[in-house]
Image (cartoon, rainbow, N blue to C red):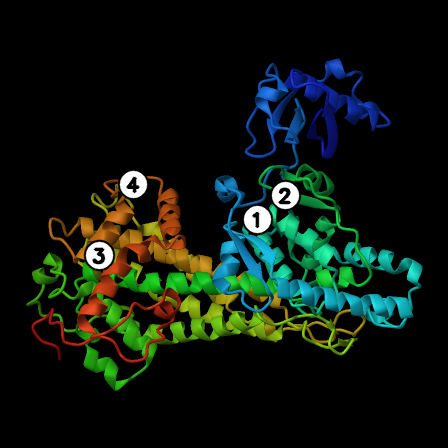
Amino acid sequence: MLRYTVHVRGEWLAVPCPSGTNTVRWLGKEAVRRYMKNKPDNGGFASVEEVKFYIRRCKGLGLLDLDDTVQDALEDNEFVEVVIEGDIMSPDFIPSQPEGVHLYSKYREPEQYISLDGNSLTTEDLVNLGKGLYKIKLTLEAEAKVKESREVIERIIKEQTVVYGITTGFGKFARTVIPNSKLKELQVNLVRSHSAGVGKPLSPERSRMLLALRINVLAKGYSGISLETLQQVIEAFNASCLPYIPEKGTVGASGDLAPLSHLALGLIGEGKMWSPKSGWADAKYVLEAHGLKPITLKPKEGLALINGTQMITSLGCEAVERAGAIARQADIIAALTLEVLKGTTRAFDTDIHAVRPHRGQAEVAFRFRSLLDSDHHPSEIAESHRFCDRVQDAYTMRCCPQLRYLDYWQIYAVSTVFHSCLLLNFSLKMVFAERAETISGGNFHGEYPAKALDYLAIGVHELAAISERRIERLCNPSLSELPAFLVTEGGLNSGFMIAHCTAAALVSENKALCHPSSVDSLSTSAATEDHVSMGGWAARKALRVIEHVEQVLAIELLAACQGIEFLRPLRTTTPLEKVYDLVRSVVRPWMKDRFMAPDIEAAHRLLVEQKVWEVATPYIEKYRREHIPESRPISPTAFSLGLLEKNMGVGHNHRHQDEL
């Protein structure tokens, strides 16, 4: 017996199919028949036969041939949608996929596992879990701790001790004692009532990160969740069954209650859920399609699932990783722009930066030398202006090491906060098995990750602000000695005119987004929660700032490569030629005006995937080995943050005849 889950006009129907030789048309008619049966007015239809429809897969929205057999066209337990001809589908409901889920079309079930104990997860691990690269399992030590803490909860219930959140209500109802017969109902009611978020759902990657981080916290053994329930949560993660989690609704104190409640709601089989196999569907059907059962909450387990700052922290970890990635690639793009604008490398001389011995500043200067040193990497462009009369460049090129030092320091400072956040327990009711008691505290408060994310947004924004000024220099013929807006036949063609406007718009928007959300607080829960962090918004806007920074730098990367076209046949240094070749592998030169948005997106994707860094870093490291005796390769994290033990680089590079 085959079975399919069919979506008809906003309802999900389980349709058994007795034979694989039945047609897709039969499946559609049977789904419509069941839909009509559930409606008092038959759904407005006189009979099944008069209904005209087509059928498509929920995943990918591929149309199906009605005359194909189900065994040829579909897999068992597949999710499909019946679309009635003449219906206007609501633009607010997409049954197949959330925004950005096209990236998940490449999803393959991972074979490798990460073992979680609550104490060793890194930000890189979390991001990789979000990408679906690993499954999760618990260490034996974690399993033992979880069992021990659950025994404390069972003892409290057996002895009928009055304990907040276990045998009492929540918030203002903390003094209301709940009878033992309703303790399970209390936990389900908690999850349902707190599932009050709004807005778009988190993407699959971010939902996976949130779920993985919650599992990591529960693995510490302080929540009182049972091992059986925790294993069910892990099974849902490993099957990539991801609940519908609206992005808005948390104030970041007493945890991220709304988003984590939506997370728990899907796990108990209510609300919506997504998987690569099903797309969006009712949670109970998605779980069933993967051979899983909804979780039945035991006393304290609802509270265990929803009390923590894992949304702030998981989004913050993504922000830290992306900030580090774009920061180190920004140096490469700036070096390329300096080359196109025929700038000097004298400002990156080792002795200058030894006088002001900031590690990050020295590292940025070293990178510029490693990419632009014409003695090491001959550059025909550099040779063409070796004896020019220009003696110094604009601040956005000359002062990159000094301007960028603080950016790196800020990224480093925030990364240390989030590395510690991954190791901490953000819960209200802590279970201490060794003391056989529970204690209510304030570890759930999201104040310091919120402030750290506000700080990160301010620091990373500077990368875009500086980049936009360099784009202006590339496009302005009075500053660049290149054709206006980097295009021939100006007037007939507009070239990069509006691309620069886009960069300016993004930088201006970032200025508003950099206003700290953590300076705000509104009292909630009848003044019980009278100071909150607003960390959820801090995390979301930090990610938006970082995305804008990536997009501005993508525009600069395109503009710099376009500038090289007007300097040909002269060639730049080998590492920068490799960067140019990378860009040209996805974006062709601009001979005349064309649709520009896809080019910007293609360059943005190169930065998000760190392709620019991958191309350039072997040359940077080779230069380091040749100029720094007994040096070792720097890890990507340390490299992006400038955490070096000493100033790197020796010697001088003379591009111009003199420097005043």
Which residue corresponds to mark 2? 274
Q: Is residue 647 above or below residue 169?
A: below
The residue beneath circle 4 is 593
Q: Amino acid at mark 3?
A: Leu
Question: At x 73% / y 55%, what residue is drawn?
Answer: 229
Three-letter code, disc 1: Pro
N-terminal of the pair, mark 1 or mark 4, is 1
Farthest residue to the bottom: give it: 355
Relative to 192, 559 lies left or right: left
State yes or no: discs 3 and 2 in contact (Cβ < 8 Å): no
Query: Does residue 91 lie above or below 636 as drawn?
Result: above
The image quarter containing residue 278 is top right
Q: Residue at x 30, y 59 (%)?
A: 471
Q: Secondary structure at mark 1?
A: helix
Confirm or deny contact between disc 1 and disc 2 (CB under 8 A): yes
Crowding at mark 4 (Cα within 10 Å: few <14, some 14-19, many 20+)? some
Lower position in the chain sequence, tag 3 or tag 4? 3
Upstream in sequence: badge 3 or badge 2: 2
- First in sequence: mark 4 vs mark 2: 2
Q: Please name the residue that numbered disc 3 is placed on.
A: 576
| Nearer to us in this view, 492 or 562 | 562
Q: Is residue 628 above or below residue 283?
A: below
Residue 204 image label: 1
Q: State how far apart marks 3 and 1 are (Cα).
A: 35 Å
First reached walking from the N terminus: tag 1 or tag 2: 1
- Give the spatial CA distance, label 1 vs label 4: 36 Å
